[in-house]
Image (spheres, rainbow, N blue to C red):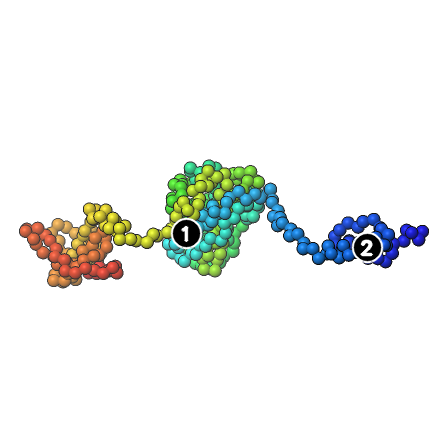
Amino acid sequence: MSGDVLSQTEVESLLSAMAAGGEPTAAAPAAPVAAAAPQSSAASFAPAKPREKITPYDFKRPERVGKDQMRALQMLHEGFGRNFGAALSALLRSIVEVKLASVDQLTYSEFIFSLENPTCFNLLKAEPLEGNLILDINPSILYPVIDRLLGGGRERGPLARRPLTEIELRLVSRITALFLDELHRAWENVLDLKLEVVRVESNPQLVQIVPPSEVVVLISFELTIGEIRGMMNLCIPYNSIERIGEKLSANSWSAYRRPQATAESTEKISRALSGSLVEMKVQLAGTPIATGELIGLRVGDIITTQKDVHSPVTVCVEGVPKFRARPGVFKGHKAICIDETIGDTPEVVGN
């Protein structure tokens, strides 16, 4: 029985091996363990082999869109956001800030389940791209925009949780049409897209444009109107842009970039424009008149103005005031004599 009992040295060796992550070996006599101790001590000072970095790969979310293409899409839609924000501000007559929030790739099912229900889910057709695109407008920003179009103020009202009515759909179509116009301009350096809205749904789970596991590119924009914020999402399936992947490269296109003018380019443009025909008009005078007086005008009536006969008249080129001149007669024809050039600042022509 005494031969089956481990010595203190053997117990410490087993505990050290288990703490180091190794497999414990069968017990050995004390003398061999003591003899092997110097070798174990020497081995402990050997340099550890560096472990290779292992990156897990998720087959449910494959990275099918390259980094260069994602970077190109981000640059393209950053310029689009600025232009769409300016156009939307003009439509709503209020300052609207549109900022590109993110450009990500995920599965279609993840995109669908991240949306609210009900929402404004627009199914888009974008020829010559294959399949359909998705434009989702979050209700948190959609209803304030509709309220603004109907003459409301900037105050936040109660958020409606219902599908859009027919009148609201007509108003939303103005927003989506503006979005598609600016999107066409943003993509024209890459591809001439013909965009149109196929249909509008309130429940996003009723629309299945690609399989749930298909990869899509989600481009999210954050809209800000005063203190109101909301999101607009543009979903582009990977199979729609798979064939034009080589065009989505920062080296093959440029968008919203203004090249520096050179002397050669300026001279070339000047030669091309030198033979262009422009419309020139001379405004002799102007005066307000009532509608009743306008209707009652007859041949031979005289309209008086407050403009002095000796004061200069304004000459407009393509509707822009450019010169000041004096009216006169030259070889029996009505003529003007230009006195000075008007600066670049637009001038409001008075009476």
Name the residue type under label 2.
Ala
Neighbours of disc 2 within 10 Å: few (<14), some (14-19), many (20+): few
Residue 9, percent from left and from top: 84, 57
Front of the two marks 2 and 1: 2
- Foreground residue among 143 and 236: 236
Q: Is residue 166 left or right of residue 313?
A: right
Q: Residue at x 90, y 51 (%)?
A: 4
Name the residue type under label 1.
Gly
Residue 281 visible in image: yes
| Residue underneath mark 1 | 79
Q: Residue at x 79, y 56 (%)?
A: 37
Residue 85, percent from left and from top: 41, 53
Q: Residue at x 60, y 44 (%)?
A: 58
The mark that comes first in sequence, 2 or 1, is 2
- Foreground residue among 140 and 82: 82
| Residue underneath mark 2 | 35
